Amino acid sequence: MKKVFSSAPIMATHGLGIVRIIFGALMVYHGKEVFDPQLMKEYASWDSLSGANGLLWVYIGKGTELLAGLFLLLGLFTRLGSLLTIGTMSYITFFVGGGKFWYEDQHPFMFALFGLLFLFTGSGGFSLHAIIFEDRSGMKHV
């Protein structure tokens, strides 16, 4: 019971790893829409994306979501995946959605915040980064 009320972390590395994997899977889920041309055309018809390069920007955005999601899911290049997530989801929140992150655009804003979390903390447990780089230096990278 003492641990529940303590401010000390409980299994922080494993907990971060589990959250990163779920978050990465959700990003992949949203990014896989890049393979649905009909849906991509629908997104490009939105007022905030309509224009000469609207379809290109939709493909770039969805491709970035997919790539960032794969990086985060695997725990490899986590900080790069985080930066891609922060940029893409912030653009969606403030330019495509109108910036009402406290009400209407909570979903993409929360994705941007999770990206910020993993930018600061790294990949946590269960990551390819730890498997690949742990033994080389003798240090555990998180």
Image: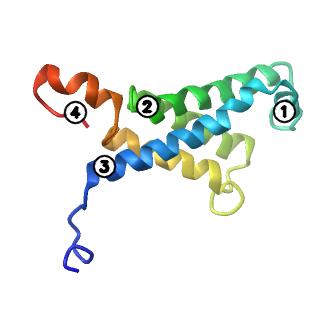
Task: Provide the residue designation for mark 2.
Answer: 74
Q: Are marks 2 and 3 in contact (CB under 8 Å)?
A: no
Which residue in the structure is indicated by mark 3?
Answer: 14
Please state which of the two labelled residues, at mark 1 or mark 2, is closer to the viewer.
2
- The residue that label 4 is drawn on is 141
Q: CA distance from mark 2 to mark 3?
A: 14 Å
User: Which numbered disc flags the more N-terminal residue, 4 or 2?
Assistant: 2
Could you tell me how far apart the alpha carbons at marks 1 and 4 are, in whole angstroms? 39 Å
Label 3 amino acid? His
Residue under numbered circle 1: 39
Give the mark nearer the N terminus: 1 vs 4.
1
Could you say whether the residue bearing mark 3 is in a helix, strand or loop?
Answer: helix
Q: Residue at x 53, y 36 (%)?
A: 85
Q: Nearer the viewer, mark 4 or mark 2?
A: 2
For this view, does 7 lie left or right of residue 124?
Answer: left
Is 26 on the left-hand or right-hand side of 34?
Answer: left
Inspect the image, locate mark 1, and give the three-letter code of the amino acid beneath it.
Leu
Q: Position of residue 127 (x, y in %)?
A: 34, 34
Which secondary structure, mark 2?
helix
Query: Which element carries disc 4, helix, strand or loop?
Result: loop
